[in-house]
Image (cartoon, rainbow, N blue to C red):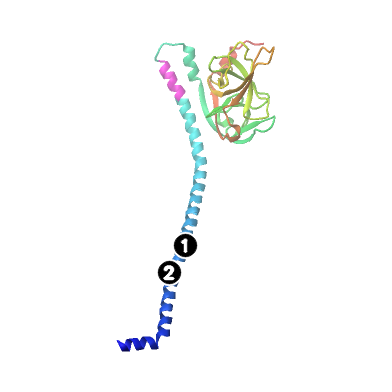
Amino acid sequence: MQNLLRFIREYSNFLLFLVLEVAAFLWMISEQKLQQSTFLSASNSVIAWSNTLLSNTDEYFHLRSENADLAEENARLLTELNRLYGMVEDSVEHDSTYLYSHLQWSYTPAKVVDMATQSQHNYLVLNKGERDGIQAGQGVIAHDGVVGVVGAVNSHFAQVIPIIHPKMRLSCRIRRNGQTGFLVWTGPSPRYANLHDIGRHIEVRQGDIVETSGLTGLFAEGIPIGKVEEVELPDGDTYYSIRVELSTDFQSLRYVQVLNNKLVAQQDSMRLKQ
C-alpha cells in the first residue's frame, strides 16, 4: 500500500495528464457522434424534401392526363344519362315532347388551349374541331355552368364566343319563378353580367339561381348560369337592373363540354320567318 502511495506521489503529474487525455478522447468521440447525427439528420431532411418535390412534380404531370381522362368520362356519362332518361320515360305515359328533349343532346369533351378573359373581345380556343364533330353554333358548358357558343371552327380547333363577350345575348330564366330574360355582359369583370327584361311586377331576390331557358336550341334547359348578386329598380323604370354573379370561373377554366343538339335544324325550321 505504501509502495502504491509512493508511486502515485512520484507520478501524480503524469497520471493527471493521462486522466485528462482519456477524458478529452472520450469527449471527442462523443462530439463526432453528435456531429454525425446532426449531419445525417440534415441529409435525411434534404433527401425527404427532394423526394417530395419529385413526387409532386410527377403527380402534377400525371394529373393533366387524368383531367383529360375525366373530361372524356364526363362526356360519356352525360350522354349515357340522357339515353337512360329516355328509356325510363319511354316506359310510362307522358308528353312525348319531354321525352324527345332528353334524347337530342350529346357531349364532346374539349380542352381550352388559348383564351382572353380580360378584354372587351374575349374568346376561347378549344383543341377539338370539325374532325371531332364540332360545328359553329354549338353550345359550350363546363362542370359549373354555361361557357359560351362555338363561333368558328377548322379541322383541329374551335373558337368559342364566351358569355363574357359584349355581342352575346343568352336566353335565360330565374329558376324559382320561371321568368325569362336575356343575359348581357358589359364588362369589365369576367365574374359578373346583367340580366335584362325582368319586369317590375316579378319578385326577384338576391341569391336567385339564373339558368338556361332552353328556348334557343343552343342549350338544354336548366343549366346554371349564375345567381342574382344585386337587384335594383330605378324610379319610373319598367324593368329591374339585375347583376348576376356567373357560375363559370373563366380564369381557371381548362376543360369544357361541347353540346350537340341533334334536332337543332328541325327546331329552327319551326320558327316563323321574319
Helix, strand or loop for the magenta stretch, by majority: helix
- Residue at position x 48%, y 19% in the image: 102
Q: Is residue 122 above or below residue 26?
A: above
- Which quarter of the rendered picture does the N terminus lie within? bottom left
Q: Give yes or no for residue 83 being in the magenta stretch.
A: yes
> Do the residues bearing badges 1 and 2 touch, measured as CB atoms within 8 Å?
no
Q: Horizontal and vertical percent for residue 269? A: 59, 13
Task: In the displayed orientation, state which residue is furthest to the left.
Answer: 1
Q: Which mark is residue 38?
A: 1
The part of the chain drawn in magenta is 81-90
User: What residue is rendered at 40% in x and 83% in y?
Assistant: 15
**Is residue 12 shown in magenta?**
no
Q: Which residue corresponds to the image point at 48% horizontal and 53% vertical from the top-left?
A: 51
Separation of residues labelled 1 and 2 (CA atoms): 12 Å
66 shown above or below 241: below
The kind of residue on which mark 2 rests is Ser
Within 10 Å of disc 1 (Cα), the crowding (few <14, some 14-19, many 20+) is few
Instruction: Where is residue 165? Give x, y as percent.
Output: 66, 27
- What residue sits 31% from the left and 88% below the top? 2
**SS label for mark 2:** helix
Q: Is residue 94 left or right of residue 6?
A: right
Q: Earlier in the sequence, mark 1 or mark 2?
A: 2
Q: Which residue is mark 2?
A: 30
